[in-house]
Image (tube, rainbow, N blue to C red):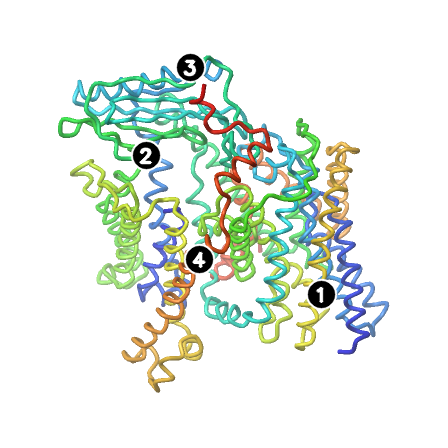
Amino acid sequence: MDCGMILQCVGISLVGMLIAAAASLVPGLHIYNVIALTMVFVFEVKELFPNMDMMVLTSFMVGLVVGFSMLFTISSQFFQPCDDSSRYIMLPHEKFLFERRGHEAVLLSAVGGMVAVFFISVAIPIFGTYFSGLRKILTPHLYWIIGAVMVFLLMTEWPKDPGTGPTPLKKMFDGWGALLMGYLCFVLSGLLGVFTFFRTTVPVDSAFQSLMPVFVGLFAIPSQITTILAGVRYPPQHVAKSAEVYAEDVVRGSASGLLAGSFASMIPAMTPGPAMLLSGHATVTGGDRQFIIGGGAGRMMYYVGALLFFFMPGVFLRRGGAAINISLVFVPETDAQFYLVTGIIALTGALSFLLVFGYSRMSIWIARKVNYKWISALGMAIMAALVWHVTEWQGLVIMTTATFIGLIPNYWHTRRINLLAVLLVPMFLSLSGLGGDVAQALGIF
Amino acid sequence: MKGIGHFLTGIAIASFFPEAMRGALDEKSLMLLLGGAFGILPDTLDFRIGRYLWKHHRIVTPDLNNLDARPVAAAVAESIDEAARTGKAVHLKLNTLKVSANYHRTYSVNVDDKAKTVTARIGPLKTMGQVMGGTGFLPRSLPDVPREQLEAVAAFKADAVNSYHADTQVAIFSGPDFAFVPDNGKVRVDFIPWHRTWAHAPLLGVFFGLLGLLVYGLVGMWQGAGPEAFVSSKALSAFGIMTLAFWGHTLVDQFGVLGSVLFWPFSSKRSAGFKFTHAASVMGNITLNYICVAIIVGNCLAYSSIDQIDSALPWASWLGLAGANGGRAYFAVGVLNYLLYFMAIPLALFYGAVKLWPKVFPGPTAEDTAKDEAAEGVDGPGELSGD
């Protein structure tokens, strides 16, 4: 690979990172939504410049993913404050916002992200083959591992309501209300997932983006609606010159996040949410700082680490939306490509980490000038437009259906993780060979 | 131990059953999941059902608008004396005080069995993220009530034995339950008495195992294999997995402070734990989880191709042993190889790192914490007892 090509790839990856920075201002917008839109652009470019080396466009996508993974939660931090009335538990980063420490939460998350970038750039090239060997051993077992995650999620949500009713039955009813709504959420999301996996409802040209309206509906739009309906004000934020964090917090938080990210990278249908839940329990993560650092590390490891495995010679693991989309236009072949992508990840990761400081300040400034409800309304409009553009009216119908399901956890105080049944259930059925039978029994095909 | 430890213990136990492993590879069987499900089941039964069936004789809910520790201390002391006087157990529940979605008002209770006193204290606010007022960045946030309402002491007359935590905090989610049980002329203080009772009893594990045997046996018969298929290896494996996974939970719990009711329904007395670790111990949980994952992966490896086994465990091929898992020597060397490479060495490295850690990265001293708190304008911990 010549120097000119390397410089082109590095340059375009920085452009990707900057575009990710701009897109990250829309709270709730997911990296895969941006990639979906980018793919439309990539196909156009490919048609216009048939001789163009696809490594260049691939580098652009890598920069986009790295930048997004580091920055995309910052807008949610400041533009989506948690309203007490719609939540049973306030997560640590949400709590930090009300304690004037939103900027500190952003920095802690970025520290986790940077540790993950370091790990990905150094450890995967050295130890990646062991990871690949482990995956080969576990491949025939993936179906029951996904099944085990589902069983664990369903059996370990404890009733949050202490149950103060006069009779045991009434107490149990108090406690089980949220649990049953969680089960309803799981079942509805699972059915939606089976429907989406086994039947193409969006236009055939956009079939590779059939999950986009589902995810926007289940996660992004409900968050926006909840924010628009929220009636909270949060105090002016303190931009700290340093973040109080001990080495133990960084090590334990990052270890938990890296474990979660690695698990999610290896197991189909797994995302950082349930993986973080499992790894947090397994490593007994303690305290708010470790939770936030772990989140940053886990997201980076999942989105970027999994992507690097796609380029790794002898592994070529196609896990996650980024790798799947890139594989539509690019087939990795050489060691040079792998090391170039590794370098791009290290560079864009470090630069986006530096970007975090200013980006967080800018978000605080925007939140001071513009009511967060308007930002969420704009975000919701952008996402609906995106869904319509990529998947047409059929996508909008699916998105609306998913939105109703996605609102359940907010208003019945149950786990949002249940919504991930949309991936877990169809993937489990598919890998265990039951997918066709179940889809047929449900009249899907 | 944390729930995931029990869950992994159950799957690790199931992975020793050849029927479950072969079934996973050949028939996409779900037998391994039985291990996980029955490994976690005792806690699921306790926290989703058992706690609601528990009958409370006294329920204490302090008034959020007029916080007062005196009725709390009095209720606990009276319950102890009532148990001694009547010779019957008294069940007491202390309800939590939810202020908002993120904040709970805390209070604590201390039963001093030597001094025969109960001390109740109204405490600071606590967040759902477990941040207590007076630490970190959260102000101490004590309520503005007369001093005698903040801390109160009530005396009891009976002889009592309190072997669990000296200080019980009532903070978030559900509040603690106590049972004051007359035992050998004294009153024993049991903490969360509905936990680790019938739902952790080994006999219940046998019952579930038999249920598994019945279901798998009937399915085998229904699939046309005839009556002899009732006691098939699959049905026996289901019995073994369900029973042992359930027992695994009880056994793992036994290593902590609190034991289980081991002989239910013949006795309702909860045994004491071995006290090797405790439920929230970082080292204990990580060690258990790592060992379980290593066992599961090791058993998956045992059913992999020879190439995969040889590349992960090279000792057997170095010694020129052949026959894969069919050969006993090959298998034994492989197991030793696995134990050293993937269990002993990683755990030794982990324990070594934990041991060295405080020397390399000393944590915050009490002086640092005091400085931080002073800088943040947080009241010191001595506020309540100071003049």
Could you confirm whether marks 3 and 4 are on the same chain?
A: yes
Chain label for disc 2: B
Which is more foreground, mark 4 or mark 2? 4
Q: Tag 4 or tag 3, which sits nearer the N-term?
A: 3
**Pointer 4: what residue?**
B356
Q: Mark 2: give few (<14), some (14-19) or many (20+) Cα within 10 Å.
A: few
The amino acid type found where label 3 is placed reads: Gln
Chain label for disc 3: B
**Pointer 1: what residue?**
A344
Real-space Cα distance between discs 2 and 3?
23 Å
Residue A43, percent from left and from top:
79, 64
**Pointer 3: what residue?**
B149
Which is more foreground, mark 3 or mark 4? 4
Residue A91, percent from left and from top:
56, 38
Q: Quadrant of residue A157?
A: top left
Q: Tag 3 or tag 2, which sits nearer the N-term?
A: 3
Q: Identify which residue is drawn at 66% across, 39% down.
A: A102
The amino acid type found where label 2 is placed reads: His
Q: Residue furthest right?
A: A48
Element type at mark 2: loop
Real-space Cα distance between discs 3 and 4?
46 Å
Chain label for disc 4: B
**Pointer 2: what residue?**
B165
The amino acid type found where label 1 is placed reads: Ile
